[in-house]
Amino acid sequence: MKSIFEFKNILIHKAPVDMRKSINGLSVIVASEMKLDLKSPSLFVFINRRRTHMKILYFDKSGFALWLKRLESSKFSWPKNIDKDVVEIAAKDMELLLDGVNVWTRFEKIDFEHVV
């Protein structure tokens, strides 16, 4: 099993998918809906409607692999205010997302003119 840090891109399919889909069904989504190269060094991330299950598809040297993570008592945070259908995420953010952290809300930068 590879580390998420070994991949060039981590690409999230924003719309929920049927978690009964396996490698073949998710590959069709990557190729036809996301219009991406299945054999690129990328992770393709999918979620179910309730945001309790996440599947991650990738291709390595010898074939496809599929990871599944199911949260028992919470939900994955998911991009809401992003207009794109495919969202790229950094490996560090993906690691946090897998741990249940909401990576989509960031602190706003505060500018000030003087210090009291």
Image (cartoon, rainbow, N blue to C red):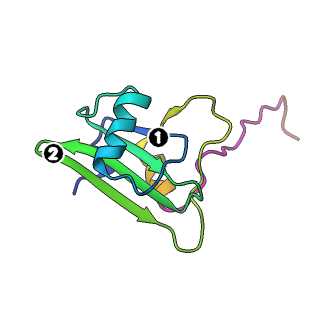
Q: Quadrant of residue 8?
A: top left
Q: How many marks?
A: 2
Identity of the residue drawn at 39% across and 37% down: 29
Of 112 and 81, nearer the camera is: 81
Which residue is labeled 1 in the image? 12
Would residue 83 be found to the left or right of residue 32 on screen? right
Would residue 46 be found to the left or right of residue 4 on screen? right
* Range of residues picked out in magenta: 99-112
Comparing labels 2 and 1, the label whose residue is closer to the camera: 2
| Position of 63 relative to 39 (above/below) | below
**Amino acid type, mark 1:** Ile
**Amino acid type, mark 2:** Gly
Callout 1: SS: strand
Which residue is labeled 2 in the image? 63
Would residue 37 be found to the left or right of residue 55 on screen? left
Q: Quadrant of residue 31?
A: top left
| Tag of residue 49 | none
Task: Report x, y in % for residue 60.
Answer: 18, 43
Task: Report x, y in % for residue 112.
Answer: 82, 32
